[in-house]
Amino acid sequence: MENTAYIIDTFFTLFAMTLIIFMVPGFAMLEAGLVRTKNVSTVLTTNVMIYAVASMAFLLFGYSIAFGEFGSDAMSKWAVFLFQMAFVGKTINIMSGGVSERVKIMPLAIFTVIIGGFIYPIIVNITWGANFLADTFLALHMYDLAGSTVIHSTGGWALLAAILIVGPRRGRYRNGKIRVIPASNIPLVVLGALLLWIGWFGFNGGSVGSISTKENADAVALTIMNTNTAGLAGAIMGSFFMWFKYKKLDITMILNGALGGLVAVTAGPDLYNIYIPILIGAIGGTLVVFAVPFFDKLKLDDPVGALSVHLVNGIWGTLAVGIFASNGDDITFWGQLKGVLLIGVFAFAASYTVIFLINKFMPFRADDDDQQQGLDFTECGLESYPEFVRN
């Protein structure tokens, strides 16, 4: 058939997009399990709103900023759009989870329009897209297959900006001590993390772009294999260091170790042999275990560990490409570092400015009484567990 490759690649891209959309309930379940029961409906509503609002903003103006006009000769242009649209909400999911339990929905929705429609598309433009910096000294030569920096670090920088403006949850830090707020539903945490893990196969595998030839099929399979391997190594090293440090196997940290490994390998899973992702993922899982208490010492309150998983490992994974896949021409360590720094400065500065301005007119932070009562009551009027006694 004349159009066989076109049809196969269109179907492949739509299937990969569907796997990525499975990350929406993944983030929702993970965050719902890690927050207190009195805030679960708010977290779920936020995740649904992000998917809807970010996707619409990307449809109306974000895609054209990133890539120009719709178009593709290799597959349906609508499949290309849907695949790219599936990415955009993940950046904001990273940020929203890290400010859970003290942020209102409406100002976050406004920020979602701006980051999904403008900030993220500009970052995509200079990396994967039209590249308006191509003829300037700021032009990037960074390899980032599926977004260790473009998506994960961008979300992490936006989260850091939000935490600095919004502050910690009520009572999180008292008299110089850290008050532990335990997860409310471990089964949901496990379900959410494993949905994210499965979604990553579409996230990274789909980013290869084609599966209609033998060479491309092998590249997709290797990419997915290396993605999974890094997740396995992150989980194992997270387990090891939790046992070594605390003599406890904390499933939330084990899963965050796995997610850290997945974030780290996302920049270049198509470039490595089958062994390098073990090292990249193992370092990623280790970084998570040590970064979580480090950010707590700085009083950067992050209920889901998103800074440790996405920001730290987004940086590590992008630099790892320069270490393990440098070819002296297109990929260099300094090119990777330049991309990390330029995107980091832009993502943080733009996010901080926008959140600061929105916060002046529509405060992000819920007041202490609302936090005490639970945001489900004040934000949604619908509690996930109304029969539970809260404190």
Image (cartoon, helix red, strand yellow):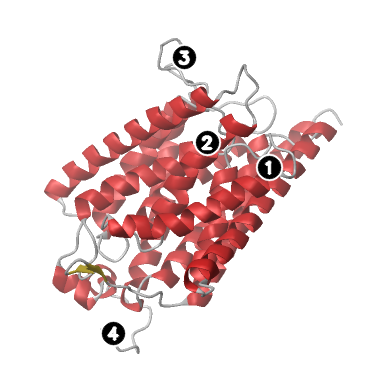
Q: Is residue 328 visible?
A: yes
Mark found first going from the N terminus, 1 or 3: 3
Q: Which residue is mark 1?
A: 276
Q: Position of residue 49 (x, y in %)?
A: 38, 56
Q: CA distance from mark 1 to mark 3?
A: 31 Å
* Image quadrant assignment for residue 10: top right
The quadrant of the image that shows the C terminus is: bottom left
Q: Which residue is mark 2?
A: 318
Residue displayed at 67% across by 35% down: 208
Residue situated furthest left in the rendering: 360
The quadrant of the image that shows the N terminus is: top right
Mark found first going from the N terminus, 1 or 2: 1
Q: Is residue 112 visible?
A: no
Q: Amino acid at mark 2?
A: Thr
From the image, state whether disc 1 or disc 2 is nearer to you. Answer: 1
Q: Secondary structure at mark 3?
A: loop
Would residue 339 appear left or right of 78 to someone viewing this image?
Answer: left
From the image, state whether disc 1 or disc 3 is nearer to you. Answer: 1
Q: Position of residue 179 (x, y in %)?
A: 27, 72
Residue 390's disc is 4
Q: CA distance from mark 1 to mark 4?
A: 47 Å
- Front position in the image: 339 or 158: 339
Residue 134's disc is 3
Q: Position of residue 194 (x, y in %)?
A: 59, 63
- Front position in the image: 23 or 14: 23
From the image, state whether disc 1 or disc 4 is nearer to you. Answer: 1
* Image quadrant assignment for residue 136: top left
Q: Amino acid at mark 1?
A: Ile
Q: Evaluate if marks 1 and 4 touch, with contact meaning CB atoms under 8 Å apart.
A: no
